[in-house]
């Protein structure tokens, strides 16, 4: 079992739909990262959170430390949201220098 | 300036060539990273520099040689690579450890080894 598991692996939505991507982890953490990668491109950090909820535009990230679970929500999805979304947690033994990544969720939003 | 700049964006090299990938950031970040990413896979950590000192080497073959000339620059020297080393090489930086700070990535250098 991977330390970080994401679901679903692939997600196809129609423009305007509400999207949820889930991330579960098996280790104790102090922070969790959500990242976005467009095809052929670099990676953008969307959120780093250690508790509660964060919002940036149409993106919302939540985390429940007790349940070891985080969700990334996209409201009013748009084709430009099509990308791979990756959840990652720092490994404690390296003072947080090493991230354990989930396998990613490929999101396709159709017009 | 919130950018991590990588050059070149694309590189094709033969197995006997020597080349370098370069990475630059001017955000005052003290940790810099090299990752390797194969298609449809998450990034794999290669090296971490913390305060210009190599702090993590993930058992990377010696044909990859990192260098951190100063706090803003990170190089990856490539020599005698194999075709299986073809991948996207991503540089990243953070102000502090990733328990407290975000990771900023460059656009990557896509390497093809013939």
Image: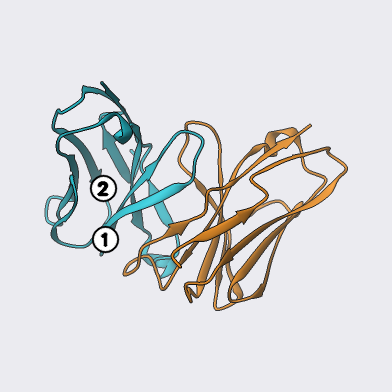
Q: Quadrant of residue B57?
A: bottom right
In the rendered structure, the residue with mark 1 lies on which chain?
Answer: A
Q: Quadrant of residue B14?
A: top right
Q: Can residue B58 be seen in the rendering of this structure?
A: no
Q: Colour of chain A?
A: cyan
What x and y, as percent, mark residue A15? 20, 25
Work out whether residue A76 or residue A66 is closer to the camera in this orientation and state it. Answer: A76
Which residue is pictured at 74% across the width and 33% down the height? Answer: B83
Work out whether residue B112 or residue A2 is closer to the camera in this orientation and state it. Answer: B112
* Disc on res. A29: 1
**Contact, mark 2 vs mark 1 (Cβ under 8 Å):** yes
Which residue is pictured at 59% across the width and 65% down the height? Answer: B24
Q: Quadrant of the C terminus of chain A?
A: top left
Residue A68 lies left or right of residue A82; in this view the side is left
Residue A35 lies left or right of residue A7; in this view the side is right
Q: CA distance from mark 2 to mark 1?
A: 9 Å
* Disc on res. A25: 2
Q: Tell me: residue B2, above or below residue B50.
A: above
- Rate crowding at label 1 as few (under 14), some (14 to 19) or many (20 or more) other CA atoms within 10 Å: some
Q: How many marks?
A: 2
Q: Tell me: residue A61, above or below residue B23.
A: above
Which residue is pictured at 14% across the width and 38% down the height? Answer: A75
Which chain is painted in orange?
B
Work out whether residue B4 or residue A69 is closer to the camera in this orientation and state it. Answer: B4
Residue A110 lies left or right of residue B9; in this view the side is left
């Amino acid at each position: 079992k991977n330390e970080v598991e994401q679901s679903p692996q692939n997600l196809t939505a129609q423009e305007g739909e509400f999207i949820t991507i889930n991330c579960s982890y098996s280790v104790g953490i102090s922070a969790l990262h959500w990242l976005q990668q467009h095809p052929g491109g670099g990676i953008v950090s969307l959120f780093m959170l250690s508790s509660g909820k964060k919002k940036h535009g149409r993106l919302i990230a939540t985390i429940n430390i007790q349940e070891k679970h985080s969700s990334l929500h996209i409201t009013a999805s748009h084709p430009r949201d099509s990308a791979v979304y990756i959840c990652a947690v720092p490994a404690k033994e390296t003072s947080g220098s090493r991230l354990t990544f989930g396998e990613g969720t490929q999101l396709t939003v159709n017009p | 300036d919130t950018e991590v700049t990588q050059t070149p964006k694309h590189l094709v090299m033969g197995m006997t060539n020597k080349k370098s990938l370069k990475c630059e950031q001017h955000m005052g970040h003290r940790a810099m990273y090299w990752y390797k990413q194969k298609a449809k896979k998450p990034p794999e950590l290669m090296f971490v520099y913390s305060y210009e000192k190599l702090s993590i080497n993930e058992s990377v073959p010696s044909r990859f040689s990192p260098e951190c000339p100063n706090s803003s620059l990170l190089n990856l020297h490539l020599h005698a690579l194999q075709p299986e080393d073809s991948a996207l090489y991503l540089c990243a930086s953070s102000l502090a450890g990733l328990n407290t700070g975000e990771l900023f990535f460059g656009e990557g250098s896509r390497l093809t080894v013939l």
